[in-house]
Amino acid sequence: MTLTIALDPAETEPLFLQIAARVRSAIITGHIAAGARLPSARALAAQLAVARGTVDAAYALLAGEGAITTRGAAGTVVSGTARIEAIEHTPFMFAPETTIAAPGPLPFQMGLPALDEFPRKLWSNLTVQAARALQPADLARADPAGVPALRQAVAAYLGVARGIRASPAQVLITAGYQGALSLVRSVLLRHGDPVWMEDPGYFFARQALEASGVRVVPVRVDQDGLRVASGIAAAPKARLAVVTPTHQCPTGVALSLPRRLALLAWAAETESWILEDDYDSEFRYTGRPLPSLKSLDRAQRVLYVGSFSKVLSPALRLGYLVVPPELAAAFNRASHMMTLGQPTLEQGVVAAFMQRGHFARHIRRMRMLYADRRRALASALEAAFGSSASVEMAAGGMHLLLRFAGPHDAAALAKRAAAAGLAPTTLSSYAIAHDCGQGLLLSFTNIPVESAPSIAARLRGLTVARPTCDLG
């Protein structure tokens, strides 16, 4: 069938969400009947003059909601009417202080590695070599599960660095963390399934889960990480638990060993699944590296997610998902239905970067650099704020937490900071149902040591709405 869709480039909402909203509306209002076959992603992308990946993302979102079903060669069709009418839609929203892609990294901007230290020359050389090595077969179609060389490199790296024993067949290359989460939603979750989510927790993961129609169950986090007993009390037979055990997002605490074992025991007993987001475990500055939850998993209930965004560059849009052996076939089928794979050239470059030892050397260099930048920013903040705020430094990660001593409107400060060219993130924007206090999350990765004092002073100067005379 032909769809008549009008997109508005002036809208702040991403194009894939506009497409999903218009298709969804047409289904609910009856303009597209149940069982109708939708245009292919390629055809609709050509009609709308957008990238095919944009339509793929819209279709993946609708499939996760249960509005449409992908049937491989048979095409994409609208699901049954009863299923569609049951969908509860959650508007997609950015975090309160999140802005659309600003040029260049801003001070305190979360989620970015040190872009000034990206190995550009080496990367350029590897890219040229990978391009010259491409064969006609490589240009035909990417393997949706990932280039074999990269899957092998990831499996080998995880075995050494994270103690994870997995074959390349268990590794899928994804479009970052969100791509991995989309696959998990497609294979394991159905509308209305209860899913544990850390509270506070990563807001984009929560929004993606809510948009797919599952029931997010907020589970409080304390100094030992996820309160497993609270999760069991709230939803004892949850289908999935989404956790960041090595460096909890956003508080930075680590999931204690007793709770790790309790979480694994719960999953084994209830035949539930655990999604381990190990987003920045490479960067630990004190103590011994913590084992991954997956490395302790004897019952094969943990799915492990990693990303190259925090180590190399978010622009790569590459991550990986390690699944238990019994799920490998199902996830491979889902990856074939939901995506035609990630760019082959970029995967080849990353594979060469890992196989030749550059990846491990880059991580070691970044760990040393971040340790210096972390220490410098913490010292600068303590000097600038004095007793009015405290700096919480986790054992690892890529950001600090600045907590205020008295009543403080962190959201208002974040807005003033954004207007002044800084990009702190409020702690409260990660909260779901429980108050986690007032504070700012401040990334140190893109703040050189010599710039830390002046940037900390800029933030301190914004803590009042109007200039005042500090006699302190």
Image (cartoon, rainbow, N blue to C red):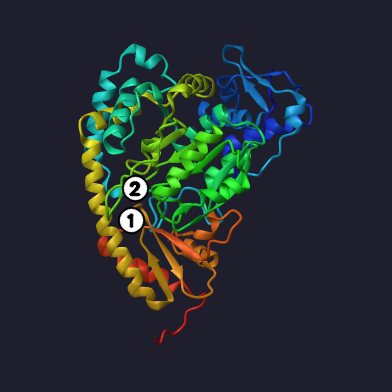
Kindly identify which residue carries mark 1. Answer: 395
Callout 2 secondary element = loop
Asked if one can make out residue 353 in the rendered structure from this viewpoint, the answer is yes
User: Is residue 89 toward the left or the right of residue 441 in the image?
Assistant: right
Are there few (<14), some (14-19), or many (20+) residues within 10 Å of tag 2?
Answer: many
Q: Nearer the viewer, residue 343 or 233?
A: 233
Residue 94 is situated, as x and y percent measured from the top left of the image, at 56, 49
Tell me the residue that label 2 is attached to.
113
**Amino acid at pointer 2:** Pro
Q: Residues within 10 Å of mark 1 (few under 14, many from 20)?
A: some
Above or below, 162 relative to 106: above
Q: Which mark is residue 282?
A: none
Residue 78 in which image quadrant: top right
Q: Tell me which label, 2 or 1, sits earlier in the chain.
A: 2
The label nearer to you, 2 versus 1, is 1
Q: Is residue 449 left or right of residue 100?
A: left
Q: Amino acid at mark 1?
A: Ala
Q: Residue at x 54, y 56 (%)?
A: 429
Q: Do the residues bearing badges 2 and 1 touch, measured as CB atoms within 8 Å?
A: no
Q: At which x and y percent is residue 8?
A: 63, 39
Name the quarter where the C terminus is drawn: bottom left
Q: Quadrant of residue 65?
A: top right
Can you name the residue that lies furthest to the bottom here?
Answer: 471
Examine the rendering and report whether any part of residue 94 can be seen: no
- Residue 40 lies, with reference to residue 114, above or below; the image says above
Question: From the image, which quarter does the N terminus lie in?
Answer: top right
